[in-house]
Image (tube, helix red, strand yellow):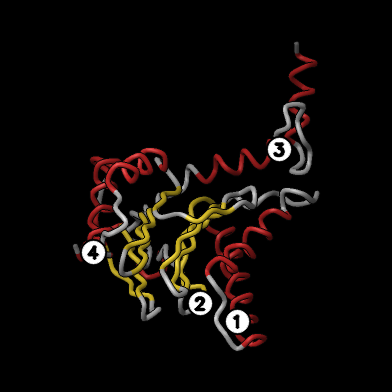
Amino acid sequence: MEDMQHQAMGYDRAAQTFSPEGRILQVEYADKTVRLGSASIGMVCKDGVILVSDKRQKDKLVVESSTNKIAEIDEHIMTVAAGIVSDARVLIDKARVIAQQHRVTYDSEITVESTTKEVADIKQQFTQYGGARPYGVSLMIAGFDSSPRLFTTDVFGSYWEYKANAIGENDEKMKDRLRQEYKSDMTCEDGIKLALKIFKEVEAENFEKSRLDIGIMKSDKKLVRKKGSDY
């Protein structure tokens, strides 16, 4: 029995090694890291797209402006991450360079889906080659092309488009509530109120409006930042 356990353990020593069950264990461990990260909710609304994220930062010694969860990739694209924050920072920086290169090369803005695909491709590479671990982060990428759009990338390098989604801690509970209450004809203000309601239900006594960062993007393709305490 001990020999079998040691043999099974060997399959999680490299990100490019499949177990006999067809699983890549290092990538699955990275996915568990994402579910330990602070939660975020994204929604496509009739007048735009929103991201609402819990900073989960309580230390009064930390400068508040340095803990913003919602980042701008390009003028019309924003993102939020769950998982290892430093991994997210590196991927966001890469996405910013890709977006600027697209503007210089084609004299036009990159689409939200193209940005998401480029990030997902980078993630996938780190599930295939040795010598480096997978990125332990999931990114929700939202923006405005001709219409509002919302995508999510996972640690495997896959991505999907969503009407509404949640990532991070308690993501399944939040997605269950979104399935029940999300409506495509909601305004951004309605969506923010729903997100706050879900955070309050899921986090219970740990809920604090002041910890929530909010990003709003409408047809003017400008990121508007707000705080949960504004509502």
Q: CA distance from mark 1 to mark 3?
A: 34 Å
Q: Position of residue 187 (x, y in %)?
A: 26, 64
User: Looking at the image, which residue sits at the far left?
Assistant: 231
Q: Is residue 147 above or below residue 102?
A: above
Element on which disc 1 rests: helix
Q: Amino acid at mark 3?
A: Ile
**The quadrant where residue 228 appears:** bottom left
Q: Quadrant of the N terminus?
A: top right
Q: Which residue is drawn at the image coordinates 79% and 38% (left, top)?
A: 17
Q: Which residue is mark 1?
A: 100
Q: Nearer the viewer, mark 3 or mark 4?
A: 4
| Marked residue nearer the N-terminal end (2 or 4) | 2
Badge 1 density bin: few <14, some 14–19, many ≥20, Cα 10 Å: some
Q: Which residue is mark 3?
A: 24
Q: CA distance from mark 3 to mark 4?
A: 41 Å
Q: Amino acid at mark 2?
A: Asp
Kindly check if marks 2 and 1 are in contact, taking CB atoms under 8 A apart as contact: yes
| Marked residue nearer the N-terminal end (3 or 4) | 3
Q: Position of residue 159 (x, y in %)?
A: 57, 54
Q: Is residue 113 above or below residue 166?
A: below
What numbered label is drawn on residue 189?
A: 4
Q: Which residue is mark 2?
A: 74
| Marked residue nearer the N-terminal end (1 or 3) | 3
Q: Position of residue 83 (x, y in %)?
A: 52, 50
In front of the other: 39 or 206: 39
| Marked residue nearer the N-terminal end (1 or 4) | 1
